[in-house]
Amino acid sequence: MNLQFFPTDITYETNVQGKAAILLFGRSLSGEKICVIDANFEPYFYTIPKSKEIISQLQEKINRISYVHDSIRYVVTKTEIVKKKILRKEVEAVKIFVNHPSAVPELKREIRSFDEVQEIREADILFVRRYCIDKDIPLTSPIEVEGDLISRTDLDVEQVIKAKEIKKIPKPSPNNLKILAFDIEVYTQEKQYPIEKRDPIVMVSLYGNNFEKVITWKKFETDKDYIEFVDNEAELLIKFRDTLVNYNPDYLIGYFTDGFDFPYIKARSKINNVSLIINGSSIKINNKGIEPQARVKGIVHLDIFKFIKNIMAGSLRLDNYSLNTVSYEILKERKIDLRADLIGLVWDLGGKDIEKYCEYNLKDSMLTYKLAEKILPSIEELVKLVYIPPFDICRMSYSQLVESYLIKSAKDFNELYPNKPDRSTVSSRKIQTYQGGYVFNPNPGLYENIFVFDFLSLYPSIVVSHNICPSTLQSDKTQNSHESPEIIENNVKVRYYFTSEYEGFIPSVIKDILLKRTKIKSLLKQNRDPVLESRSYALKTIANATYGYFAFFGARWYSKECAMSITAYGRKYITEVIEKAQKNLINVIYSDTDSIFITADSKSKEFIMDFVNQINLELPSFMEIELENFYPRGIFVMKRGENEEGAKKKYALISEDGRIKVRGFETIRRDWSYIAKETQKKVLEIILIEKDIDKAFNYVRDIIENIKNKNIPKDLMVIRTQLKKSVEDYDLIGPHVVIAKKMLEKGMFVGPGSIIHYIVEDGKGLVRDKAILPEDSKSYDSKYYIENQVLPAVDRIFEAVGYEKKDLTEEKSQLKLKEFLK
DNA sequence: ATCGAGCGGGG
DNA sequence: GTGTACGCTCGAT
């Protein structure tokens, strides 16, 4: 039979012959959920001999490899001698085919030890990724399969096809993929976070196209027909699984579901002794790295928080990335305002109030669904560009995206992609520093009418126009080579040279991206098209990350010389713009790498936009500056001349709609006391909204006075820290560990995950010696709260507007204020 | 100065 | 899973 479908998820299994077979899950054009199994693909990798002459000898030796380990056979099935390129130079390599993906790491170790071998290449690409690239199958775009229907009772799909042949349909068409969003609510004690071992899941919501459901296990009177009651948590879990499989979405969307919901569901399933099998497999939490990932076989689980945080945060510039904040920014819609830590109370009380939490639960899923509708097209465009499955694209960082795109592109250039750097290389790269982007530090202070411009394609266009690439870097200057601006390296002035004889691998990849984007943008000028907008976004995302990639310590195509040359050109271009602005009497207050902040002063918005348009006409092709936003007021706290590497960039801006954007102030964290967080927030508000520095100053002095006189309620003095492991496992005893021990002695429940609340009391010694349970505390250490909490949160702000730290603490220093106001 | 530990997101 | 894992800040030592 012959079938067209949109593949969404890819994995592999080992069949009865001991061979790997690819499983492609997806949706047919007629809307059925299907699985295509393709056993016609073999793993392979390359080795490069020390010299050309011994290549046949090496090939012979490799052909004979075969061994058994733990009763698994690892065999070289075939070898070929092939011509490849490394940084544009031709090499001969042995292409080694093996019987199974797991044979690759085994056999590569063996072959690497041969005397004839220079190095191993391309032995670390995932089998499924290799398949997508070699067979030219980008997921989510239409595929045609020729094959036979087979029966697979373990798979929750409508059809399973064993593929004979599979190929991409070149004509793009919009997909018909189904989205379902979900969210759980967990029994929570007041002012605490839930603990897996103790607190059950009380409800779960699911939201799709014309589909809404909340499952909960405590009955109450309700006329909401989306609420479904079950008897207990175990049934809730089973109902969740069944609802999911019945709806059978292609994408299952959540918000921080990798880090919270799925690990929680998994843990509670174990406690309730229920197994949630989907497509013959349980939910897998990959916990090996720092951040867990939750995988459901055959359904693409996307934690959109990851994509927002890793990829979109740079352009969103929000001060936190909670569902509420992000929804408000993107959808202009907020969460229902309910305290999540009171669920436990309401649940125990029972009755109609639980309904409010059902609505709250559903709203979270709905917001997540709506965010996915906005974001998914961009993820899908990246999937088609980079040839990585949506599951991985959603969780990738910028550098991984760029690297994956380069690996995919390497095939078109017959390039062998480089190996990853080893540990020692990584650590030596980490300590390397060099001149970065140009930073124009402002004089600290309060500014009005601020325009922010971004110099977006600055670095990618430099890469293209000056052919900057590890493959074009020359040891000496030659005729017609590109010469970088002067760079200071280890106190010596140097320049780098890049050949113009041929186009480098990376510049031509980036040029292709920029050309495609230019074409799309001109189409977009005629007609608005959400798909093209997403494509443009995807192209921009990759292009803008190239510079950072050259300088990233883990990069395969790392090049300090390239990175330095790019920033050197960048400094040249951005300082030229700054100089032109100043010639036009436009006041530049701040600039960092690729953004420029100016104040309008008496200039009209038209004047400034005209200036920007003029700059864009003069800039080389692809380069342009765009208006990022306008801010009526902003406060900058760094000093001009304080331009050393890594200097913290701190500023706060208020936009026309009254929202405050904060950069570089770190007090949104849980482990600061409320008094510190509140004071900082208030100070920024008074300065930015009320424009009253005087008032802000006196506000802080009052707070400090009140702390000294012990007039602050002790609730505001509480510091919260989470216990991450059992108390006996700690080597380093911090204040929260001491308190946890005390709580255990008192017979209170404390375990990994508990939030420990404490107050720092008067006394001698370390902070931990002074830490005390809030209910036992009679007073608090004023000095600690003033000097370690409140002042660090606000002192730089006041320095920016002309005060010193001591002005805040010393008795009566109104003089300074008067001086400043003159 | 170095190192362990927690934060974020989630409830 | 043909694999690797964040970047920063504070307190203790």
Image: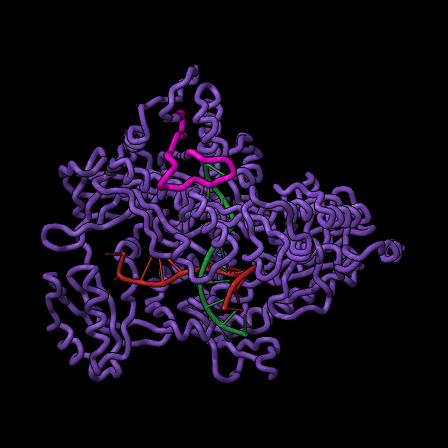
Chain colours: A purple, B green, C red
Tell me if residue A280 comes above or below residue A238 in the rendering.
below
Is A658 on the left or on the right of A150, as rendered?
Answer: right
Is A239 on the left or on the right of A364, as rendered?
Answer: left
Tell me if residue A818 comes above or below residue A643 in the rendering.
above
Residue at left offset 37%, top offset 26% = A216
| Res. A640 visible in picture | yes
Is A602 on the left or on the right of A105, as rendered?
Answer: right
Location of the N terminus of chain A (image quadrant): top left
Residue at left offset 54%, top offset 70% = A466
Tell me if residue A250 comes above or below residue A698 in the rendering.
above
Locate residue A369, reporting x and y percent: 44, 34
Locate residue A181, reporting x and y percent: 40, 34
Camera-nearest residue between A228 and A94: A228
Which quadrant of the structure image shows residue A140? top left
* Residue A188 magenta: yes
Camera-nearest residue between A483 and A666: A666
| Res. A378 visible in picture | no
* Residue A635 magenta: no
Locate residue A556, reporting x and y percent: 40, 68
Residue at left offset 15%, top offset 38% = A152
User: In this picture, which residue range is highlighted in magenta?
Assistant: A187-213
Location of the C terminus of chain A (image quadrant): bottom right
Locate residue A270, reporting x and y percent: 28, 40
Camera-nearest residue between A595 and A85: A595
* Number of marks in picture: 0
Camera-nearest residue between B10 and A561: B10
